Image (cartoon, rainbow, N blue to C red):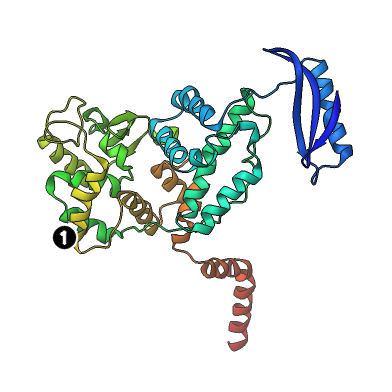
Amino acid sequence: MSLFQRNGRYYAILYVTDEKGRRQRWIPLGSATKMSKKEAQAAHDELAVRNHREELVIPKPITFREFSEIWLRDYCEVTLKPVTVAEYRGYLRKYLLPKFGEMKMTAIRPAHIQQHVSGLVRQGNLKPKTIRNQMVPMKRIFELAIRWGYATSNPAERIALPRQEHNEIAFLSPDQVRLLIEATDPEWRALIALGAMCGLRKGECLALDHSGVLFSEKRIHIKQSLWNGQMQEPKTKRSIAKVPMSPTVEALLMDRLLISPPSPLSLVFCRADGSPLRADWVNRGILAPALKRAGLPRVTFHGLRHSFVAGLISENVPIKVIQELARHASVQTTLDKYGHILPESGEDAIARLDAAIWAESREGAATQRGGETS
């Protein structure tokens, strides 16, 4: 057992017993420019003790491409929603595999990942959000690689990422929501109303079946979501709920159910043959034409959900009630997303606090002045 330095890097040389028997292994410790010889010796000694106790795990040789496929197949497809798996697979195919695919997992350093991120920023072709999102699967791949014995550290942990600008989602006022619903084809008005008046997400609307419309309770039971033609659980556990429906939404849903085609899935909104609607067609074939006819600004279907929350805020609904109706995980989530459109400004809040603190003093002064004049 010994400590060795080569090409600016320290290595611990140990005799390790693995599936191939007892053999000499060179274990990288760190860069000589960032680690003193004393620190390297301490790291070597720790490894030697763990090796003696048979607790030392030597990473298995595998490329990033090979392990990412294992990660997708044996972890992601078992534990994550199909939409998340598809998103991670896309980031790997487009950005990460071309750069790191043929590198050994143990050879990927923080500097390699930082150079990748910095290069994308300098190119200027991608939004900061897209660059940041790539690092989510990158971190998770190495987290699992450590647990499964394919890596000893996570090089994606402390990478400097581009600052993400907050882009506010466009939404409609209550008056504009009414104009939009009136301008929508009658057969789809209930669909638009569910987004703008109940806060349902597009996938939740498209997955709504007849059993989810609870006329006796005046509620809509959200229990599933449609993505890429497949039913799945809603976005979060909090999303599974029974939300109130107003008399207008109730009437629109009644009209829709009277003309809704028979569907194998008993869907409220479906094609003429009963098959699920395509999510992109909802925007292109229903929402966009209605906005144009009403002369309204362009908004997405998700913007209808924002319109729902903004409408509640404009009516001074308590923030806790808004959180429950929007099915956010916490009040803080609601404040983070919509705090910028709360009606009371900072100046108003300070003025109200000032009035509350000094109210008694000012009343006393006013009474005194009244007594003097009398």
Q: Is residue 307 left or right of residue 282?
A: right
Q: Hey, which quadrant is residue 200 in on the image?
A: top left
| Residue nearest the viewer, comparing 265 with 79 | 79
Q: Hey, which quadrant is residue 20 in on the image?
A: top right
| Residue nearest the viewer, comparing 41 with 198 | 41
Pointer 1 residue:
293
> Total of numbered circles in the picture?
1
Residue extending farthest right? 38
Q: Is residue 100 left or right of residue 327?
A: right
Q: In what quadrant of the picture does the C terminus appear? A: bottom right
| Residue nearest the viewer, comparing 274 with 194 | 274
Whether residue 3 is visible to the viewer of this picture, yes or no, is yes
Q: Residue at x 60, y 44 (%)?
A: 113
Residue 287: x, y in percent?
22, 51
Q: In what quadrant of the picture does the N terminus appear? A: top right
Seen in the picture, residue 160 relative to 154 is either above or below; the reply is below
Give the structural element (helix, strand or loop) at label 1. helix
Q: Amino acid at mark 1?
A: Arg
Whether residue 331 is visible to the viewer of this picture, yes or no, is no
Q: Residues within 10 Å of mark 1 (few under 14, many from 20)?
A: few
Residue extending farthest bottom? 373
Q: Is residue 197 left or right of residue 347?
A: left
Residue 300: x, y in percent?
31, 52
Q: Hey, which quadrant is residue 214 in on the image?
A: top left
| Residue nearest the viewer, comparing 178 with 207 | 207
Q: Residue at x 64, y 28 (%)?
A: 146
